[in-house]
Image (tube, rainbow, N blue to C red):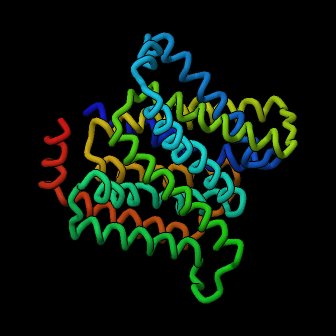
Amino acid sequence: MKKEYIYAFVSIFLWSTTATVTKLLLGNLNSMQILLVGSLFAFVFLFIINLLKGNLKGLKQYKLKDYIQIFIIGILGTFLYNLFLYLGIDTLEASQAFIINYLWPIITVVFACIILKEKMTLRKVIAIVLSFIGVIIVTAKGDLLNVEKESIIGATYCILAAVSYGLFSVLNKQKGYNKFLSMMLYYLSSFIISLLYILFSNNTISLQLNEVLGLTWIGLFTSATAFTSWALALEKGDTAKISNLAYITPFLSLIWTALILKESFNIYSILGLIVIVLGIFIQLKDKKENISTINKQG
């Protein structure tokens, strides 16, 4: 198996646990508190990895412009993405929020066409349309004319998360910074922003042992390890093809939410997910273009 697929599948498994662990933590903590501690743990973990790998000396090569760009990209991919996702999970059922959030791989394809000048094919357009139809099915739950206000708000949070991470993925690939160093700095930017918010809002955090364990999982595995692995996968493979693999994650997430959170399998959530996945198979048939793109990147 090629390295890009190994990196992608590691991320997929870890990300599949995000909704379940976050929903459990949201029982006593708010989104910003989870973001603060999770970002700190992720930064510390990546700092240690970079220290052991001897990467820290590479920080001297970055100019002020680079640090500003890294800070902005970090806000998109670690702060805003996670904040909107946590708010969405807090508003909706964890399974619903996670499915809607998985609009982001197809949004990555859109931004790749706009920013990286990758070709927009008919298959990609069909995949995009089907993805949005899938989101509508999940949100409306079979009654498009009577969608609950809470569902609209939750879906909006998840779509904003998808847009944030889609743009982050493309900018991260475009700039080409060292993946381990940049991810460390991305989480540092997220920690700084969330810390400032906590300080100015006089928020206090009191953690129980189970919450520490949950935040450790969020920071070290679903954040630091998974996001770094995904960045490496996108760097080595075709943006559209690798991004589409991420749609496996909601299926795994549905299993975790059912087993641990006891959320029932909603027929409309499953139907919406199937529609989204249908778009994947249509887009993945575009073999000649995918091979051409991979060859150019290799």
Is 29 situated above or below 121?
above
Q: Looking at the image, which residue is at 38% across and 27% down?
A: 178
Q: Looking at the image, which residue is at 87% across and 42% down?
A: 202
Is 282 situated above or below 205?
below
Closer to the camera, 14 or 170?
A: 170
On-image quarter of the N terminus: top left
Tell me if 271 is positioned left or right of 61 in this view: right
Residue 77 % position (x, y): 51, 45
Tell me if 199 is positioned left or right of 60 in this view: right
Is 26 situated above or below 232?
below
On-image quarter of the C terminus: top left
Residue 86 % position (x, y): 66, 52
Q: Say how many tags the image has.
A: 0
Q: Would you identify the image quadrant in which residue 96 lies?
A: bottom right
Tell me if 122 is positioned left or right of 127 in this view: left
Residue 268 % position (x, y): 55, 73
Residue 158 % position (x, y): 58, 60
Closer to the camera, 169 or 277?
A: 169
Q: Looking at the image, which residue is at 48% across and 10% down?
A: 52
Q: Looking at the image, which residue is at 48% across and 17% down?
A: 50
